[in-house]
Each structure stands twice: as structure tokens, then as C-alpha cells.
Image (cartoon, rainbow, N blue to C red):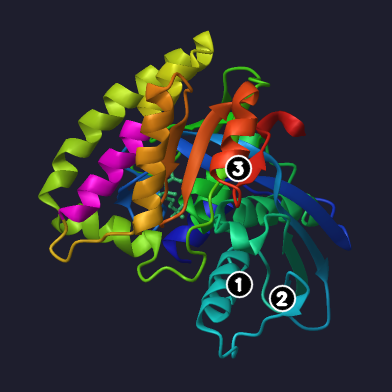
């Protein structure tokens, strides 16, 4: 048994199997980012992180027993022999994940669809692996609790462990080598007027995956040494701002945390720069609006597409300044 297989086996017990199961999981955006692993096989992070989910935007996955393995993504069938590199990589990653849980000879039909418009350039691997984990839980009758599902989803994609809930989720890095204390939990309470806007700057496949960028940063960026201190400072400020519903502190901290993460990548032997001119424009534009008394902040993941944090009362400003932005209400579901 591989390390991943034996890890997964600790959290599941097959019960009453169903013919078919369907589950939804929301996408999430980290306000304090996960960047750097202490164990690449089990996706154990070096630092804790905290995210907010994207309401009804996420992934719905149906899995059923079948004669053959089939995988459909957004109505399109994808085989392991696909000539589309990103589709092939997705299929390989998903089947490798599902293989951790099924018995030899078991064939499955997997249908997965993202309710996030592809043009939004939002990572769907977090909601994808979380929805898949929930569907497998129902299909195989594991009756696993949320902490166990979070640990399992993490094996598919680190950030997927935060996509099991609506609202804020805090992923505890843990310290144990066996990863037992490494899972996410819901954090804080609802914040109904908090909003997010996703600005699609470039939605083509990124030149360096977040996984490769993260590993390169840990391996050869001297600036990564400062990252842990940034997270210690920012996570605490974000938690306090959520508890107090202090928007300006939340936004300011989330923005500096994202900029610090990108700074660590710039220190790589071969620097990784995801930003495009429109990414930098969004940062400056948000600063100009703040100077005019409108609190808008930016966060950016491993890609060029900025996400804006704002409050409901400033939605008209966002729509006017960023007409292509997708406006998201996290507490819509
Ligand atoms: O879960 P992964 O391996 O796709 O990495 C996610 C990394 C970031 O999106 C940049 C940060 C985060 O915490 O989601």
C-alpha cells in the first residue's frame, strides 16, 4: 500500500454502498494563503490558512457504479488518452485520487460540472476534490465526519480541505508527521454583507501550476524564510477581524498576505511572476478608491486574476470600475 492509500484507509470504513451519489462543494478563496508543504505526498502544509467560500459557485459531482470508467467534465467526456494536456492532467489526477478508495475491478462513471464560469479563471480543483470526496462518502457509505472528509479531500488538493463548508474555514497545519491533526474546520459566523469580485484578466492555462510554484518557492527562494512570520501575523489579524466584523482590517491583512506570497515566488532561482499589467492596475485602482474613502482590497492566488474584497454597499462602484468582474455573495447559499 502506498503512503497515501494507508493514510486514507485510516479514516474510512465501507458501509452500505449506494448505486449513485451526488454532492456539491463551494470554491474557496484564501484570505491568509496556504503556500508551502512540509510533506508533499500527504499535502501537509507548513503553515495554517483561512478561506471564505464562494456561495453557490463550486462543483457538483455525481459518481455511480458502471461497466467502465468514464469521466465527464462540464458535459465533455475526458479520457486518459486526451490530447488536451490540461484535460489529461485533470483526468490522471482525479483517477489517481479515486484509486485510493475503490477496490480492484470496481468501475465508476464520474460526472463533474463547475458552476463557476470557466472564464472567471477561478481554481476549481478545491471544490472539485471536495465534491468528489463527499460523493464517495455517500457512494461507499463511509459515514465519515467532516474532519475526516477534510483530511481526505486534502490528499486531492491541499486547498480542497477548506471547501467542505460554506463560510470561513481555517485549515490547521498541525504538527504531527502522520497528518492526523491537519484538517480544516469552520470558523466564525456569517458575514452577510461581505462580497468578493473575480476579475478575469487572463483565463488561459497558467505557465506554472500552483503546485510547482509552491514547491520551487520552498526549495529555492530565500524569501520563503520570511513567510511563516507573515502568516503568524496575518492569520491572527484575520481571525480577529472576522470575529469583530472589521472589514478594513480583514481587507488590509488579506491584501498584504497575498502580496507577500507573490513576493516569495519572485525570490525563486527562476522567478515566478503570475501578474499581468491588469493585475497590477487592479491593485493601484483599489488603492485609489481607498484614498477616496471606498474600502476595496485585492487578493491574488497563483495566477493573474485579482479578486476584490468589498462590502455590499459598494457593489455599484465595483460594477462600474470592473465591468467584467463576476460579483459573488459568499453567504448566498
Ligand atoms: O490547493 P492547491 O495545491 O491548488 O494550492 C492553492 C494555493 C493558493 O490558491 C495560492 C493558496 C490557497 O490557500 O488557496
Q: Position of residue 91 (x, y in %)?
A: 60, 75
Residue drawn 56% across the image and 52% down it? 126
User: Magenta part mainly helix, strand or loop?
Assistant: helix
Q: Quadrant of residue 333?
A: top right
Which callout, 2 or 1, points at the residue further toward the start of the chain? 2
Q: Quadrant of residue 66?
A: bottom right
Q: Is residue 104 left or right of residue 46?
A: right
Do the residues under discs 2 and 1 have CB atoms within 8 angstroms? yes
Does the magenta-highlighted stretch encompass residue 257? Answer: yes
The residue stretch that appears in magenta: 255-267
Please say if 113 is above or below 138. below
Judge depth for marks 1 and 3 and give the one in front. 3
Q: Which residue is mark 1?
A: 95
Q: What secondary structure is marked by label 3?
A: loop
CA distance separating discs 2 and 1: 9 Å
Which callout, 2 or 3, points at the residue further toward the start of the chain? 2
Number of labels in the image equals 3
Q: Position of residue 79 (x, y in %)?
A: 65, 85
Q: Position of residue 36 (x, y in %)?
A: 30, 48
Residue 267 visible in the picture = yes
Please say if 190 is above or below 22. above
Residue 164 visible in the picture = no
Q: What secondary structure is marked by label 2?
A: strand
For residue 71, the mark is 2
Q: Position of residue 110 (x, y in %)?
A: 75, 69
Q: What secondary structure is marked by label 1?
A: helix
Q: Which residue is mark 3?
A: 163
Amino acid at each position: 500500500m502506498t503512503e497515501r492509500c494507508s493514510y486514507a484507509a485510516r479514516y474510512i470504513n465501507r458501509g452500505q454502498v449506494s448505486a449513485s451519489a451526488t454532492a456539491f462543494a463551494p470554491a474557496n478563496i484564501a484570505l491568509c494563503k496556504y503556500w508551502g508543504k512540509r510533506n508533499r505526498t500527504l499535502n501537509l502544509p507548513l503553515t495554517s490558512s483561512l478561506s471564505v467560500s464562494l456561495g453557490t459557485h463550486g462543483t457538483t459531482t455525481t459518481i455511480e457504479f458502471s461497466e467502465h470508467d468514464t469521466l465527464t467534465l462540464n458535459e465533455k467526456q475526458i479520457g486518459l488518452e486526451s490530447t488536451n494536456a490540461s484535460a489529461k492532467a485533470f483526468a490522471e489526477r482525479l483517477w489517481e485520487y479515486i484509486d485510493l478508495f475503490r477496490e480492484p475491478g470496481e468501475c465508476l462513471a464520474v460526472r463533474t460540472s463547475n458552476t463557476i464560469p470557466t472564464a472567471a479563471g477561478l481554481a476549481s480543483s478545491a471544490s472539485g476534490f471536495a465534491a468528489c470526496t463527499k460523493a464517495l462518502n455517500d457512494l461507499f457509505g463511509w459515514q465519515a465526519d467532516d474532519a475526516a472528509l477534510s483530511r481526505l479531500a486534502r490528499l486531492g488538493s491541499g486547498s480542497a480541505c477548506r471547501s467542505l463548508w460554506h463560510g470561513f474555514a481555517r485549515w490547521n497545519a498541525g504538527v504531527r508527521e502522520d497528518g492526523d491533526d491537519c484538517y480544516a474546520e469552520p470558523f466564525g459566523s456569517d458575514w452577510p454583507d461581505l462580497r468578493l469580485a473575480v476579475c478575469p484578466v487572463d483565463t488561459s492555462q497558467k505557465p506554472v501550476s500552483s503546485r510547482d510554484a509552491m514547491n520551487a518557492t520552498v526549495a529555492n527562494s530565500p524569501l520563503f524564510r520570511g513567510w511563516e512570520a507573515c502568516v503568524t501575523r496575518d492569520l491572527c489579524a484575520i481571525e480577529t477581524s472576522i470575529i469583530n466584523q472589521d472589514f478594513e482590517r480583514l481587507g488590509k491583512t488579506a491584501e498584504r498576505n497575498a502580496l507577500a506570497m507573490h513576493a516569495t515566488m519572485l525570490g525563486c532561482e527562476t522567478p515566478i511572476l503570475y501578474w499581468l499589467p491588469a493585475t497590477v492596475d487592479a491593485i493601484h485602482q483599489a488603492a485609489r478608491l481607498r484614498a477616496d474613502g471606498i474600502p476595496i482590497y485585492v487578493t491574488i492566488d497563483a495566477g493573474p486574476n485579482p479578486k476584490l474584497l468589498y462590502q455590499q454597499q459598494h457593489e455599484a462602484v465595483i460594477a462600474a470600475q470592473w465591468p467584467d468582474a463576476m460579483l459573488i455573495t459568499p453567504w448566498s447559499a
